[in-house]
Image (cartoon, rainbow, N blue to C red):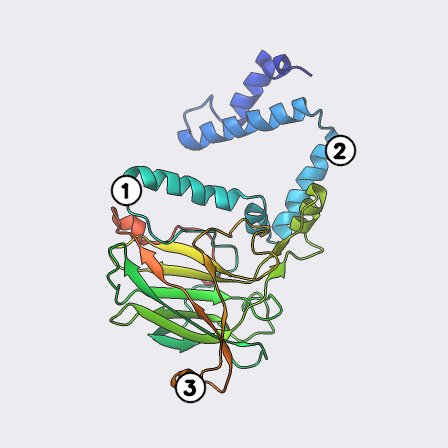
Amino acid sequence: MSHSFIQQDDVQKLLREGAGLNGPEGNERFKSIIHRLLGDICTLIDDYNVTQEEFWHAVNYLHELGGRQEAALLAAGLGLEHFLDLRQEAIESRLSSETGTPRTIEGPLYVANAPLADGYARMDDGKDAGDVMWLHGQVTDVHGQPVAGAIVDIWHANTLGNYSFFDQSQSDYNLRRRIRTDAEGRYSVRSILPSGYGCPPDGPTQKLLDQLGRHGNRPAHIHFFVSAPGFKHLTSQINLNGDQYLWDDFAFATRDGLIADPVKVNDPALIQQRDLDGEHTEVCFDFTLCAAQRAEEEQRITRLRAQE
C-alpha cells in the first residue's frame, strides 16, 4: 500500500494513542521514542506488505530470543553495539582532541567482581591443556606517562570458546582477573591462549544470521575494561593476529589498533624469569587512556551484567 495509508487520520490517531501522547502521564522522551518506533514498524509493514503470519512469526522470534537470553548477542551480530561505539567516538571527537586506545564492543559475557591482584596474576585454573600465554603491557596517558594503580579487568574464553560462569564445567572466575598496574603502569598475567567461538548453532541469533546468509563466528580475542581515577573508562578487546576470522568477525569488533601478534618464546632466561615450564606464547598490548572531562566518564556504562 502507499504511504498515504500510514498518514490516514485513524492510523495516526492509533499511533499517538499507542504511544501515550494524548495524555500528560508518563515520560515524554520515552513516549516520543515509542511513537517514532511504532510509526517506523507500521511503515515497514506497509512498505514490505508483511503478512499477519510473518508478523506473528517475528513476535514468536522475540519470545525465543529472550528465552535463550541472546538479545545482547544479536545486538552485537547486527552491528548495533559497534554502531554505538562509532557514534560515541564521533561525539567525543567533537569535545576533545585526545585520542587513546580504540574502544570496541563489550559483548554479553562479562562477569563482575573477578579476583583482584597487584601487578600480576594467573588466570587459568590449570585444567585446560591449552598453550600457555603470557599477556602483558603498560597503561599510559596520552603523553606516554605511566598510569599507576589502573585496574585492568580481563576476561576471555577457554580452548573450546566457552566462558566461565556461563559454562558450568569451569571453575569460578576461571580466565577472569583484575590486575592493578604497578608504579610503571604495567600489568601481566599467565593464562592460556583463547579460542574463537561461534553463536549457538541451535539458537535464535544463528537462525536470523542464516536468513541473512551470514556466519556467526568470532576470532580468538581477549576482553578488557581499563579504568583509573581521572581517566575515561575504556571498554575494548584485542583480536589475535593469524585467526581466520580476524577481519570477518560477525560482531564487527575487529579494529585497527586492536590486533595483537602472538609470539612464541623459547628463550630459557625469559622462561625462567617468568617462572614457566617451557615454551609459551607472548601477547603484548599497551593501553592509552584519555583524561575524563566529567566524573561519569570514569565509570563503565550501566547495563545488565552477571553478578552486578
- Mark 2: amino acid: Glu
**Callout 3: SS:** loop
Q: Residue at x 50, y 85 (%)?
A: 278
- Report, in whole angstroms, how far the alpha carbon at label 2 lies from the one at label 1: 50 Å
Q: Position of residue 194 (x, y in %)?
A: 55, 68
Q: Which residue position holds label 1? A: 96
Residue 26 appears in the rendering: no
Q: Are marks 1 and 3 in contact (CB under 8 Å)?
A: no
**Horizontal and vertical percent for residue 80?**
52, 42
* Residue in view at x 71 percent, y 28 percent: 50
- Label 1: how many residues lie within 10 Å, few (<14), some (14-19) or many (20+)? few
- What residue sits right under mark 3 in the picture? 275
The amino acid on which the numbered mark 3 sits, given as a three-letter code, is Asp
Q: Is residue 200 left or right of residue 150?
A: right
Q: Is residue 191 shown above or below 37?
A: below
In what element is the residue under mark 1? loop
Q: Residues within 10 Å of mark 3 (few under 14, many from 20)?
A: few
Q: Mark 2 or mark 1: name the one nearer the start of the chain.
A: 2
Q: CA distance from mark 1 to mark 3?
A: 43 Å
* Residue 131 visible at all: yes
- Name the foreground residue: 268 vs 101: 268
